[in-house]
């Protein structure tokens, strides 16, 4: 999927030719020196040629903040990733050419999501479901999360190697997602599958063809439509489907808009937390002094959770489109241009975060990271994600002296979802 040229040292390349939007580069965890050079020499950088077409990179913390909090000039309505679902190029032989088919493909790539909308429609649709993560609901969910986390951890083998991603990260987040949707618990792994299908274009390891991908997403829509029809006939309840079915701004959604919002909620509730769960284990293994701090002072867990989310940055970027000519950090960006906010880079920006290249679980002001975004599109489930991670680590520390990573994990082939497909670990008891 890559060539030797793509892995050249970025400092050996002309600055104008730098292209960080390479899924294989992220899979190899090789993007950091690219970001370092861009932050230092061209923090607002134009890439004229990539598999996603031309785009602008924004790599410093403060510049990203300015873009994220200016939805009038930096619109989400043309899409929120650099190139469709998953930030992964669609193979040329599987791209749809017919105009109507392109429209359908765009809808499958998430343009029906409220995160890919501008006000006022965005605000109305988001408000419909925000209540599911309101403080009173989070308080109720905390007990459920603790019970489930404990049961998952107690089921794990001691003294043998197993896949942490599958047995812990995916299982805990998928169980919670099923609860948020009031989704049939026995079918909960369908949610994981649909999340992977939504964020990985065909030919990249999840589905073989565009036809298979569409077929599986239609299966998702069909399944949830049946749940919708049940909920719309019943009194409104506190789950996400009932909220959408009864909400004034969402009850008349067309099917692909419903699917788009479903995929947003599935991916937002699944990919991000599961990859932070895995990323935290890896970060502690790579920084044994920090793991020692954790053992000595378990009270650091809430702060550590924020540091894990900064360090992992489970969604590497978000994209906007300029609605007018804009000047950013002395650079003029024309109207209609694709602007990519590289959260992963901003979270390593020494100008705004002291010792940003270090993983420090006792970091001061650890919550002041970019991983949840800012402004109207800030992740609505950020407190739930933090709570899941906090409770899980509290339960881990009650049971295990060390979660040891046994081999290098496999990272996702994506410029958008920054995560892991597997991570072999072994547990050491207290």
Image (cartoon, rainbow, N blue to C red):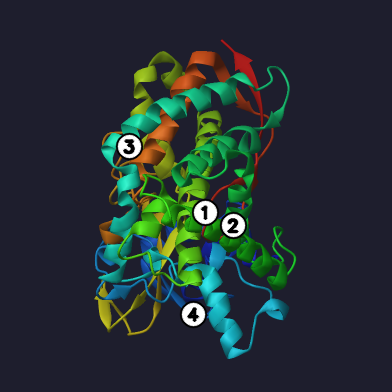
Q: CA distance from mark 3 to mark 4?
A: 43 Å
Q: CA distance from mark 3 to mark 1?
A: 21 Å
Up the image or down, 417 lies above or below 321; here it is above
Task: Mark 3 or mark 1: name the one nearer the start of the chain.
Answer: 3
Whether 356 is drawn above or below 212: the answer is: above
Residue positioned most to the front: 233
Residue at coordinates 61% horizontally, 71% vertically from top-left? 89
Residue that mark 1 sits on: 227
Is residue 361 among what the camera can see?
A: no
- Give the tally of numbered discs: 4
Mark toward the start of the polypeptide (2 vs 3): 3
Marks 4 and 1, how far apart in space?
41 Å
Which residue position holds label 3? 137
Q: Which residue: 56% across, 22% down?
A: 151
Q: Secondary structure at mark 1?
A: helix
Q: Within 10 Å of the Cα at label 2, are there few (<14), some (14-19), or many (20+) other Cα atoms?
A: few
The residue singled out by tag 4 in the image is 54
Q: Are marks 4 and 1 in contact (CB under 8 Å)?
A: no
- The x, y position of residue 205, in whole percent, is 72, 58
Element marked by disc 2: helix
Counting from the top left corner in percent of width and height, residue 107 is at 51, 74
Label 4: element kind: loop
């Amino acid at each position: 999927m890559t060539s030797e040229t793509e892995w050249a040292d970025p400092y050996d390349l002309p600055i104008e030719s730098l292209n960080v939007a390479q899924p294989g580069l992220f899979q190899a965890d090789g993007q950091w020196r690219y970001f370092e050079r861009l932050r230092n020499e061209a923090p607002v950088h134009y890439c004229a040629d990539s598999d996603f077409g031309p785009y602008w990179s924004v790599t410093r913390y403060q510049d990203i903040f300015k873009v994220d909090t200016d939805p009038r000039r930096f619109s989400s309505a043309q899409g929120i990733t650099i190139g469709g679902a998953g930030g992964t190029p669609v193979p040329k032989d599987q791209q749809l050419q017919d105009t109507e088919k392109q429209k359908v493909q765009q809808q499958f790539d998430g343009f029906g999501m409220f995160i890919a909308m501008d006000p006022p429609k965005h605000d109305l649709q988001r408000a419909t479901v925000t209540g599911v993560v309101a403080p009173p609901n989070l308080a109720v969910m905390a007990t459920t999360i603790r019970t489930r986390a404990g049961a998952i951890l107690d089921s794990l083998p001691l003294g043998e190697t197993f896949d942490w991603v599958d047995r812990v990260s995916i299982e805990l987040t998928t169980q919670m997602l099923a609860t948020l949707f009031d989704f049939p618990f026995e079918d909960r792994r369908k949610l994981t599958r649909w999340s992977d299908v939504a964020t990985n274009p065909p030919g990249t390891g999840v589905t073989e063809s565009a036809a298979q991908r569409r077929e599986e997403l239609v299966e998702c829509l069909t399944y949830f439509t049946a749940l919708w029809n049940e909920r719309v006939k019943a009194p409104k309840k506190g789950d996400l489907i009932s909220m959408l079915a009864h909400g004034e701004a969402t009850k008349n959604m067309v099917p692909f808009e419903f699917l788009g919002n479903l995929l947003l909620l599935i991916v937002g509730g699944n990919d991000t937390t599961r990859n932070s769960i895995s990323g935290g284990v890896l970060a502690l293994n790579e920084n044994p002094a920090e793991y020692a701090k954790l053992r000595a002072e378990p009270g650091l867990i809430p702060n550590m959770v924020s540091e894990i989310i900064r360090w992992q940055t489970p969604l590497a970027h978000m994209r906007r489109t300029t609605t007018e000519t804009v000047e950013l950090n002395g650079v003029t960006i024309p109207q209609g241009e694709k602007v990519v906010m590289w959260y992963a880079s901003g979270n390593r920006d020494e100008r705004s975060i002291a010792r940003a290249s270090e993983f420090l679980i006792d970091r001061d002001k650890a919550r002041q990271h970019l991983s949840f975004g800012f402004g109207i599109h800030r992740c609505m489930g950020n407190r739930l994600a933090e709570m899941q991670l906090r409770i899980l680590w509290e339960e881990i520390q009650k049971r295990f002296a060390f979660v040891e990573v046994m081999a290098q994990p496999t990272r996702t082939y994506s410029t958008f979802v920054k995560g892991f497909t597997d991570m072999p670990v072994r547990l050491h008891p207290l």
